Image (tube, rainbow, N blue to C red):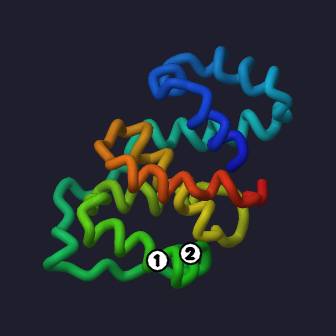
Amino acid sequence: MYEILVYLFENCQQAEVAHDRERVAKKLSAAGFENSDISEALRWLAGVLQPPAGPGVLPESRTAFRAFAPRELAKLDAACRGFLMTLEHSGILSPHTREHVLERALAASGDALSLEQLKLIVLMVLWNQKMPTSRLVAADLFAARHSRLPS
């Protein structure tokens, strides 16, 4: 799934991914991706396009502490959790966006995520929500493309 997300980020427009799933699926198939992997990635991306239902108002990260649930602790190691906290404290993620990233991380396949996989999930959430990010942030998040991501 992660290789497909990298491919989409590099080769597709956000609007195309959001509104023309059939065309995107054909592009991915033509690029050599397996149909089962394409289906998994597009299903996962559908969740990115719809923020999770939750409380309307979340406390600001500067005045509150976010405790991780056991399921989140199992999926995200200390490096991943620290990375999310750093992004939130630096203003890159809002509390709502953080929760969206966590929801998508839990929806990703596999027992645990690597930091590179989490960075790609953060990038996809920000990209699909059209969140403003600096080029430096996007470059750091997208550095995962240079490492081998397990599928």
- Marks 1 and 2: in contact by CB < 8 Å? yes
Q: Residue at x 72, y 20 (%)?
A: 27
Q: Residue at x 30, y 67 (%)?
A: 88
Q: Which residue is mark 2?
A: 76
Q: Residue 113, image x and y in percent?
A: 64, 68
Mark 2 closeness class: few <14, some 14–19, many ≥20 residues within 10 Å:
many
How far apart, in angstroms, are the residues tagged by discs 2 and 1? 6 Å
Residue 24 sits in quarter: top right
Disc 2 element: loop
Q: Residue 135, image x and y in percent?
A: 38, 47
Q: Residue 90, image x and y in percent?
A: 26, 68
Q: Is residue 123 above or below residue 37?
A: below
Q: Residue 57, image x and y in percent?
A: 17, 59
Q: Is residue 49 left or right of residue 131?
A: right
Q: Amino acid at mark 2?
A: Leu
Q: Earlier in the sequence, mark 2 or mark 1?
A: 2
Q: Which residue is mark 1?
A: 81
